[in-house]
Image (cartoon, coloured by chain):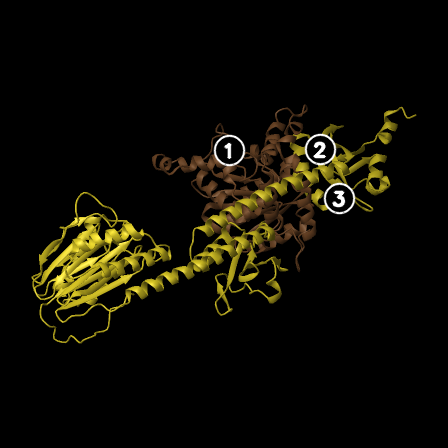
Chain colours: A yellow, B brown
């Protein structure tokens, strides 16, 4: 039975080493020699401890452990791996530095730590997984929010490319969208990003250089392909195909939704155009021009309309209105209301009666509730204009003598909103050459100015243009175009302008080409 | 930090930089010097904090204002100083160091970098030669991984192993292990500070810093340095071997190489007297 301290150095179940200040091995016990695979003391003594460690441990020793020992004199429970004959042996290492006969020496103790290493490895893995999962959720959440904020396919494409770089960890990205003719159209990304090969269209895959290819599919149909390049910085994390595949699913759905949306937008726009496309009634005693532009707001058409038609041989009806809402619903409601206003108008009914009848139409059908409109009838021979405004902005009267004014009389509530006050109409006598402008609120309303200043701008612009203080006087068509072009872009804008001459115009043909909505 | 505060206090930026990077300025004012003391900034390397310089700092406080700090994500630097994007490459650390130098000194400084900070210092000197009068690089390596015609000492696979080892010590980097490291009866008062840096180091930041350090390549930057430079090389350095020190010296246009008789990658800790002597000799000469 070993009793001396000397003997115990070799029988304790702990690997022990004594090192000099520069960590050369001065002595090693039997347990340590066994740990490194039965080496003899001669093979070990004189070598630096870091040489007996794996490379990772070597660097860790020189960058962390040795400095700590020097400053602090002690380290505990550091995990490193010893190089052994048949691989590596994870150990936990504790060490102290002490002074022995005027020399600094380092005493080292090591325990096998295979079990602990595995356990810690699992812990680290679990924590990594939790962190990665949190990062994924955050990235997907942010991408989904971005994708939800855009309407068209263009918008989805750019948002996706931005999200690829900002939240999905790519250094660069390019997108290929499948067009109507089945061709792939490229969006963004540096030239160096190579397009998808046919075999890359089935599922998310990673190329050898780390790029990830994500086919965007909905119900099996290919809508596009996203190719992401990893960041080049040495410390950048590699791309995560799992999160990219999930983001790809979100993007595919957004693309499908955008395509549907664009289709419905184009149907609504088509419908609106078709409904406004009828010829304006022409008469040698008047000149009429109209212009319509859909707003850019959410890419959806609104429910603005204009119309002019004859209610009696000598009487012309004019209307400009605005149905609440956007898209297909608004466009169809507009069509019904516009048709209804033609149907209920006749030679005996004044504007206030037409509004009354439209109220009844709205009450009976539910269509066009809260729609606003200005309705007017002009006596083509006498130039007397009867008008009424149901919740609508006042017509603008630009006189041939260069003065102008809004017609603020005969105002009442929007359609379908009855009050104790009966609908009323007012009349104004036009002089030859006078112009009346009917318009919707898109012409004058803007986020950055109030209605009053919007009206002033319209009055100034119309008066200057017609009277020609700066430029030669504009024709009515050009006036309508200019007013619409100058309107704030976010909303539908619609203008109908009429000039009364009271006598046959010199060149009026029976059927001059109609003004078309734009 | 806040814009409003900045407007009111012209020093708010400076104060902010000092707080963010735990900047300490040490000067022995009892020693008379010229009207304006020159400034020496010491930048610590990977795996360390400013306490790495604790045996070197006292040697220069009589003639210099000596400035030490903690890199973002290291030691007691403010948590908010670290940004994974900014610090994905050494350029982010160099930008930090430029801010620090501008905040602590009026004129150009003597910039001393250890290990990876020697390359950060090289980046500072090339980007802002007006800020750096002299460079001292202790145990520098412009690239750790072998390359055609270049021997850095490691293969890419070996660097991966280092990252694994760092993972294995993941718990050691966290709060859990701090109490065991703290306290050493033989050297009272020394350990607390280091225990602090261990407990506070952000493991993710350390891991990324390891990647930025060991996977980077700054060889091309050496030729752009116009600042007089001293390269201090350990005779035996398993991380940055002597031939790497020679390479650095040969590719720095105005450099002097001093090899000191020391072992290991951190001579500033293990052989501070040799490092100080090498620096003194060169600084007095130049």
Tell me, for residue A174, which label it has, or none: none
Q: Are marks 2 and 3 in contact (CB under 8 Å)?
A: no
Residue B45 is at least partly visible in this image: no
Closer to us: A17 or A495: A495
Left or right: residue A325 versus residue A307 is: right
- Displayed quadrant of residue B201: top right
Label 1 chain ID? B
Which numbered disc, 2 or 1, marks the residue closer to the eye?
2
Image position, residue B81 (x, y; %): 50, 39
Q: Residues within 10 Å of mark 3 (few under 14, many from 20)?
A: some
Left or right: residue A299 versus residue B115 is: left
- Displayed quadrant of residue B194: top right
Q: Which residue is mark 3?
A: A51
Q: Which residue is mark 1?
A: B24
Q: Mark 2 vs mark 1: same chain? A: no
Label located before the other in sequence (2 or 3): 3
Gap in angstroms between the C-alphas marked 2 and 3: 19 Å
Q: Residues within 10 Å of mark 2 (few under 14, many from 20)?
A: some
Image position, residue A202 (x, y; %): 61, 61
User: At numbered mark 2, what does the secondary structure look like: helix, strand or loop?
Assistant: strand
The residue under the point 83% across, 31% down is: A13
Which numbered disc, 2 or 3, marks the residue closer to the eye?
2
Label 2 chain ID? A
Residue A46 is at least partly visible in this image: yes
Image position, residue A138 (x, y; %): 53, 44
Q: Is residue B167 above or below residue A354?
A: above
Q: Is residue A495 above or below residue B203?
A: below
Q: Is residue B215 above or below residue A317?
A: above
Q: Which residue is mark 2?
A: A77
């Amino acid at each position: 039975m070993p009793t001396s301290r000397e003997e115990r150095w070799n029988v304790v179940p702990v690997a022990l080493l004594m090192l000099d200040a520069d960590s050369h091995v001065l002595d090693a016990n039997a347990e340590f020699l066994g740990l490194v695979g039965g080496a003899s003391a001669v093979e070990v003594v004189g070598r630096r401890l870091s040489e007996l460690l794996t490379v990772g441990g070597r660097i860790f020793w020189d960058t962390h452990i040795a400095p700590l020992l020097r400053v602090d004199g002690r380290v505990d429970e550091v995990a490193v791996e010893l190089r052994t004959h048949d691989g590596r042996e994870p150990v936990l290492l504790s060490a102290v530095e002490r002074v022995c006969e005027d020399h600094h020496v380092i005493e080292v103790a090591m325990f096998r730590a295979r079990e602990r290493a595995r356990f810690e490895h699992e812990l680290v893995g679990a924590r990594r997984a939790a962190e990665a999962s949190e990062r994924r959720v955050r990235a997907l959440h942010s991408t989904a929010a971005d994708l939800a904020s855009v309407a068209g396919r263009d918008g989805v494409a750019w948002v996706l490319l931005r999200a690829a770089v900002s939240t999905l960890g790519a250094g660069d990205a390019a997108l290929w969208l499948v067009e109507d003719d089945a061709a792939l159209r490229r969006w963004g990304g540096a030239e160096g990003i190579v397009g998808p090969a046919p075999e890359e269209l089935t599922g998310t895959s990673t190329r050898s250089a780390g790029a990830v290819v994500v086919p965007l599919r909905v119900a099996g149909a290919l809508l596009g392909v996203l190719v992401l390049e990893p960041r080049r910085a040495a410390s950048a994390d590699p791309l995560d195909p799992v999160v990219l595949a999930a983001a790809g699913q979100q993007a595919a759905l957004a693309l499908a939704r955008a395509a549907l949306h664009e289709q419905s937008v184009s149907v609504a726009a088509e419908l609106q155009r078709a409904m406004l496309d009828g010829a304006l009634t022409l008469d040698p005693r008047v000149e009429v021009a109209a212009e319509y532009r859909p707003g850019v707001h959410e890419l959806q058409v609104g429910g603005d309309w204009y119309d002019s038609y004859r209610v009696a041989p000598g009487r012309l009806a004019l209307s400009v209105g605005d149905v609440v809402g956007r898209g297909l619903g608004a466009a169809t409601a507009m069509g019904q209301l516009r048709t209804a206003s033609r149907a209920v108008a006749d030679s005996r009914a004044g504007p206030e009666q037409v509004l009354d009848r439209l109220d009844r139409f709205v009450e009976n059908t539910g269509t066009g509730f809260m729609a606003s409109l200005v309705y007017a009838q002009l006596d083509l021979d006498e130039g007397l204009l009867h008008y009424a405004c149901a919740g609508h902005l006042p017509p603008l009267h630009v006189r041939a003598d260069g003065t102008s004014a809004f017609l603020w009389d005969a105002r009442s509530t929007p359609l379908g909103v009855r009050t104790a006050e009966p609908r009323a109409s007012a009349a104004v006598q036009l002089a030859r050459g006078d112009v009346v402008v009917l318009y919707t609120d898109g012409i004058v309303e803007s986020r950055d100015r109030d209605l009053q200043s919007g009206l002033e701008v319209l009055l100034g612009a119309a008066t200057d243009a017609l009277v020609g203080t700066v430029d030669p006087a504009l024709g009515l068509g050009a006036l309508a175009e200019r007013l619409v072009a100058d309107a704030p872009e976010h909303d539908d804008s619609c203008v109908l302008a009429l000039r009364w001459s009271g006598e046959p115009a010199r060149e009026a043909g029976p059927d001059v080409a109609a003004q078309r909505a734009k | 930090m806040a814009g409003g505060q900045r407007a009111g206090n012209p020093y708010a930026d400076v104060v902010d930089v000092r707080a963010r990077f735990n900047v300490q300025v040490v000067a022995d004012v009892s020693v008379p010097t010229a009207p304006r003391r020159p400034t020496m900034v010491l930048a610590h390397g990977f795996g360390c904090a400013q306490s790495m310089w604790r045996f070197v700092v006292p040697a220069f406080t009589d003639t210099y204002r000596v400035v030490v700090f903690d890199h973002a994500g290291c030691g007691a630097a403010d948590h908010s100083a670290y940004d994974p994007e900014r610090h994905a490459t050494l350029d982010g650390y160099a930008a930090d160091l430029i801010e620090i130098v501008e905040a602590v000194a009026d004129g150009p400084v003597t910039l001393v970098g250890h290990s990876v900070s020697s390359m950060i210092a090289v980046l500072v000197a090339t980007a802002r030669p007006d800020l750096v009068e002299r460079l001292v690089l202790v145990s520098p390596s412009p690239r750790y991984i072998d390359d055609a015609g270049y021997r850095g000492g490691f293969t890419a696979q070996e660097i991966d192993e280092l990252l694994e080892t760092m993972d294995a010590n993941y718990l050691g980097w966290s709060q859990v292990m701090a109490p065991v490291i703290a306290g050493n009866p033989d050297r009272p008062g020394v350990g607390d500070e280091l225990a602090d840096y261990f407990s506070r180091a952000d493991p993710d930041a350390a891991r990324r810093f390891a990647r930025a350090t060991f996977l980077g390549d700054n060889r091309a930057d050496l030729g752009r340095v116009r600042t007089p430079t001293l390269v201090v090389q350990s005779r035996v350095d398993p991380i940055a071997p002597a031939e790497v020190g020679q390479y650095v010296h040969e590719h720095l246009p105005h450099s002097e190489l001093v090899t000191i008789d020391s072992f290991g990658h951190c001579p500033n800790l293990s052989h501070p007297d040799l490092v100080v002597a090498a620096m003194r000799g060169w600084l007095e000469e130049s």
